[in-house]
Image: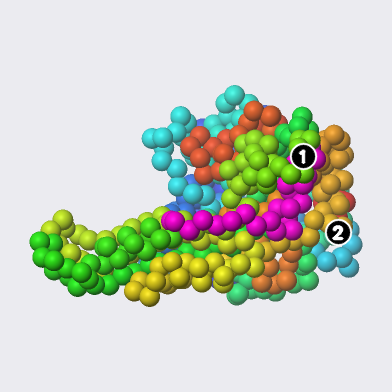
Amino acid sequence: MVTHDDAAGVPSDSHVGAARHGDNHADLPDVVRIVRDLVRFDTTNYGGGNARGEGPAAAYIAEFLRSQGLEPVIVGPEATPDAPARPSVVARWPGQDSTLPPLVLHGHTDVVPADASDWSVDPFAGVIRDGCLWGRGSVDMKNMLGLILANVQHFTEQGRRPRRDVILAFFADEEAGGSAGAAWLVLQHPELFAEARVALSEVGGYTITVGGRRAYLLQTGEKGHTWLRLRARGTAGHASAVNNDNPVTAIARAVSAIGAIEWPIELTETTRALVEGIRDLAGLPASTPPEDMVAAAGFAKPFLSATLRNTTTPTVINAGYMQNVIPASAEALVDVRPLPGQEEPVLARVREAVGPDVAIEIIEQGIGYESPFDGDFVQAIQQSIAQHDPEAVVLPYLLNAGTDNVSLTRLGITGYGFVPTRVPDDFDFPGSYHAVDERIPLSALLFGEQVLGDLLERY
């Protein structure tokens, strides 16, 4: 589906995200107001094609861009009897020099589920409290969408333009792998990203404090991800009988074998540069083990530690339906996160651990990548940070999860993650991803808008 109109089935006034809450919050800075509007759209993605749908949020974004003189298209799979339409929005923002390769600036509109009973606020109300905007998506990643839209608005109002053309993309379905979002667009409409060489999105740009110095993490790569289904088959029967062909036992052995794999630390080009940068900031000796160096990164340690090695994690077991019946089959799901370039060796090790009696099916696979921590784009990021936070440094890091940049790499586009976000030293920003009471400081949104605007003029 490609259309210049609003998403199918979305009422023309659906863009007024705050209306149902009875306020217009006109006194807020534009970037805060926009992010709050976006948070108020419940775009929950439950996975497996089950989602609330991104339609109203996509319509809001498309209307906003049209109000700034751009010509967005709404693109995505049509609705079916079993699933809503999954619209993404793409627009080209003309720059000063159309001969330069365009930059892809993208984010996703869907969010992971939020159980309101666990939260201290309504996760979709866009509550502002204690200097923060609270709500699902405020960190992942409607904050970035707001930074983008606020810059489009302010550049237009001030008669400014980015240095080069910018392809703005607001993808659906990122939280479930992007098969109805970025991956779909790359396969069905690669022309929308023609001539682009670099893309910028999540997950990076937030601050950590090491040795008294503030550092911004620039995501220059991602681990791969492979989701596996293990299936054991056996002989069904009464549980009171002796049965040596029990699939529950077989799947339990397979899961235990995978859980027992101990992956060694292996530094990639990115993680080596990261630990060396942390070592220098913290004043640690060169002999310090990499895991101890990463520990100096504070709140970011859990994320960064996982990038030092491959991981293979069993997550789900499905077997049986009654306590006195041996089932005919049993299944398990396994989350595999290989370092870039190690997808096949890791799968081979898993197959070896599982053995020949349990079948392995690849449900979904994303190939990891590393982007260079140099060149004009990285230098522009460093210069923009230096302009707004002169004492800070920028460090590269490898993301332990995945983003829509993986899909864009199939078009030869080099991906980076950098949502400029300066937070207080005691604010656990990485711990806010997918968390209860997700929130972002208002000051971080204002800072991010300035840095992103600076970057768009530099690069």
2 and 1 marks in contact (CB < 8 Å):
no
Q: Is residue 17 visible?
A: no
In the image, residue 456 lies at what x, y percent? 82, 51
**Could you tell me the amino acid type at mark 2?**
Gly
**Front residue (pair 376, 235):** 235
Distance (Cα) linking label 2 and label 1: 29 Å
Q: Point out which mark residue 375 bears.
A: 2
Instruction: Please determine whether, in this image, residue 366 is positioned above or below residue 65.
Output: below
- Residue 94 falls within the magenta-colored stretch: no
**Front residue (pair 298, 389):** 298
**What residue is rendered at 54% in x and 37% in y?**
438
Name the residue carrying label 1. Answer: 285
Q: Which residues are magenta?
A: 259-281
Q: Residues within 10 Å of mark 2 (few under 14, many from 20)?
A: few
User: Which color scheme is applied?
Assistant: rainbow
User: In the figure, residue 413 lies in which quadrant?
Assistant: bottom right
Q: Residues within 10 Å of mark 1 (few under 14, many from 20)?
A: few
